[in-house]
Every structure is written in C-alpha cells, then in structure tokens.
Amino acid sequence: MWELGRIVFLGTIAGVLGTAAGGLLLTLIGKPKDTLLCFLLAFSAGIMLAIIFQDLVLEALDLGGLTATLVGISLGVVALFLTTTYIGADRLPASGLIKAGLFLGIGIALHNLPEGLAIGAGYLSSQKLGFSLALALCLHNIPEGMAMAAPLLAGGCSPTSTVLLTILAGTPMGIGSLIGATIGTLSPQGLGGTLAFAAGAMLFLVFHELLPQAQQESFQVASTFGSILGILIGLTFLVIL
C-alpha cells in the first residue's frame, strides 16, 4: 500500500508541477492586450501543434499503428466537437477565450492520463525508470501549462485561478500512475489509441478555438509569428527534455 501511495504521489507531482510551472510563467506577464493577445494565443497553438505532431502522434503510431492512431484522432475530434457544441458560450459562464482555455485543459488532462500509466508501469519495472519518466514528463508539461494559461489570462481569468486550473489539468497523471501501478499497463494499441484521442481533441481546439481567436485582421502578423515561434519553442522542449 505504501509503495502504491509513492507511485501515485510521484505521478501527481510530475503532472501538477509541470503544468503549474507553465501557467505561472504566463501569469507573470499579466492579462495580455491587443497585439500581445493575438501573439500569445497563436504561440499557444504553435506549442500544441509541435506537441501533437512531434510527440503524441508519433508515439501513437509507434505503439498502436496507423489504424488505431487514425481512429483515436477522429474520436478525439468528434468528442471535443460534441462537447463544445453542447457546452457553448451561452451555457458556460465564461468568455470565449476562457472557454477555449478550459477545453484546452481538458485535452491536456486527457493526454496526462496515459502518461501517468507509463510512470506507474515504469516504476514497477524499476524505481530509477519511474523517477526518470516522472522528471521527463514534468518538464514536458511546462509548455502545455503555458499554452493553457494564455487564453485563460486573455479572457480575464485571474492569475490565481489560472494557476489553479493548470494544476488541475496535471492531476490526471496521478490517476494514470495509480492505474498503471495496479494493472501494469494498457496494450500497445490501447495506449496508442488513447494518445491519439488526446491529439485529436487538441487538434480540434487549436483550429476551432485558438487560431481563429488569434487571427484578428489587424494583428495577423503577430499571430503568424506567434504560431511559428510556438512551434519552434515546442520542438525545442521536446528535443532537449
């Protein structure tokens, strides 16, 4: 029981510290306005696109193959489409930007769950492997916390609430660690499909929420450079971490 508690604690801390650190970095800027707003929204989209195509999709293909990946992405897109359709701006007590940040947090939480599985299963194999995975995934979550925080702050969410929400997005990693330590791990196809589902959910949010919000006519140059810089920063994080 004590060992299981350590695994869950390790996974939770890895998820929470990473996303919270990213959220905290963005809150230091304060609520962005005008050109900076478009830049940050596009920057967030660029980070998420780098993570989707350089991390989630590649890992899903490696684990589950093409069919599981395509099915997972499609289900993720449909699930988030239905969610945003039935929880529209008129039903959610928040601005469109905050809604985009909240749904982006859902996507991040969805893909933190299978990453937690890896920590739990890795720890069962060896403590060193479990700790190494936790550290890598903690650092890996920093740009995701930044991506989530940008639309929340832009929509008027307070810095404290923004950081708390990014913390919440990281907690499913602890749940995944518990599952991974209890049942070992999912099948490669199941894990790949889960990662692809998260990728699909994020893709929908990037193209349906973040980029349309960023592409205001007066600030298209800012959003263009923001998205490109976001991709570059995202790729850099993925390579060095």
Image (tube, grey):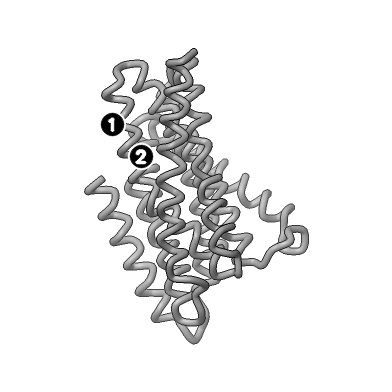
Residue 152, quarter of picture: bottom right
Count of residue discs: 2
First reached walking from the N terminus: tag 2 or tag 1: 1
Residue at numbered disc 1: 132
Outermost top residue: 1
- Tell me the distance, in whole angstroms, between the alpha carbons under discs 2 and 1: 9 Å
Lateral position of residue 228 relative to residue 91, left or right: left
Q: Is residue 199 above or below residue 131?
A: below
Residue at numbered disc 2: 137
Asked if the residues shown at circle 2 and circle 1 are in contact, with their CB atoms under 8 angstroms apart, the answer is no
Q: Which residue is nearer to you in this view: 134 or 13? A: 13
Outermost right residue: 91
Amino acid type for the residue under numbered disc 1: Ser
Check disc 2: other Cα within 10 Å, few if <14, some if 14-19, many if 20+. many
Q: Secondary structure at mark 1?
A: helix
Q: Secondary structure at mark 2?
A: helix
Q: Is residue 81 above or below residue 228?
A: above
Q: Is residue 193 visible?
A: no
Q: Is residue 28 above or below residue 112?
A: below
Percent position of residue 196, x then y? 46, 39
Q: Is residue 89 visible?
A: yes
Percent position of residue 178, x then y? 50, 23
Outermost bottom residue: 218
Percent position of residue 57, x then y? 39, 43
Q: What residue is shown at x 56% (from left), y 51% (from top)?
A: 165
Q: What residue is shown at x 26% (from left), y 45% (from top)?
A: 241
Amino acid type for the residue under numbered disc 2: Leu
Tag shown at residue 182? none
Percent position of residue 182, x then y? 49, 16
Lateral position of residue 136 relative to residue 104, left or right: left
Q: What residue is shown at x 40% (from left), y 38% (from top)?
A: 14
